[in-house]
Amino acid sequence: MTAINYANKISVETKDNQAFIVLHSIDNSRQPVKELRFLLDTGAFITTMQKEMAIKHGFKVTVPNAIEIGGFGGSKIFCDLRVIPTLIFCGYKMQDVIIATPTADKLPITEVVGMNILENFQFGVDFALCELYANARGRYISQKPKYQCGEVSLMDVAGG
């Protein structure tokens, strides 16, 4: 087994057996970087945010009533799709990140970071130390082996 060297250690807060991480957003108005706290949920297909929080941060609706997401107990919530202009996670900038916000006001939806963001990373977890590590996909340095080998067939080995 080959060990992976992870470039970024991620601060994880735990509360009630749930893991929370902080991402940062930058809008287009030269405002300071804003911290966004999300529940880490590898089972969520899309990142969600309360409508009021998205409005407060200035994230605009791009497609109204675009999707219906499922909740606990089989309930469904209609959501608008909004865009975070720049989202930073592990030092990696993602542009025009899509998030889902409920169309109705004051619905009890949690800020959840879903697979539309998480799929951009490779993660490692140290359960004993409660630490999370990540690399951004596509940022690996590939090396060619020092010595090239020709193809070897099993017939060559067995027949020898």
Image: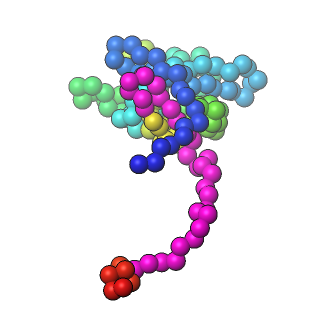
Q: Is residue 46 magenta?
A: no
Q: Position of residue 1 (x, y in %)?
A: 41, 48
In the image, residue 143 lies at what x, y percent? 62, 58
The magenta stretch spans residue 126: yes
Near-viewer residue (18 or 135): 135
Name the residue furthest left. 73
Left-right relation of 9 to 68: right
- The residue sitting at 27% across, 25% down in the picture is 72
Tell me the residue at 63%/51% (across/down): 141
Segment colored magenta: 125-153
Instruction: Assign the C terminus to one quadrant of the image.
Output: bottom left
Provide residue 125's location: percent of width, then percent of height: 43, 32
Q: Is residue 113 visible?
A: yes
Q: Nearer the viewer, residue 128 or 122?
A: 128
Residue 23 is situated, as x and y percent measured from the top left of the image, at 57, 25
Q: Is residue 160 left or right of residue 91?
A: left
Camera-nearest residue between 157 and 141: 157
On screen, 64 above or below 49?
A: below
User: Which quarter of the figure has residue 7?
Assistant: top right
In percent of the image, x 33 and y 86: which residue is there? Answer: 159
Please determine whether, in this image, residue 37 is positioned above or below residue 115: above
Magenta segment main secondary structure? loop
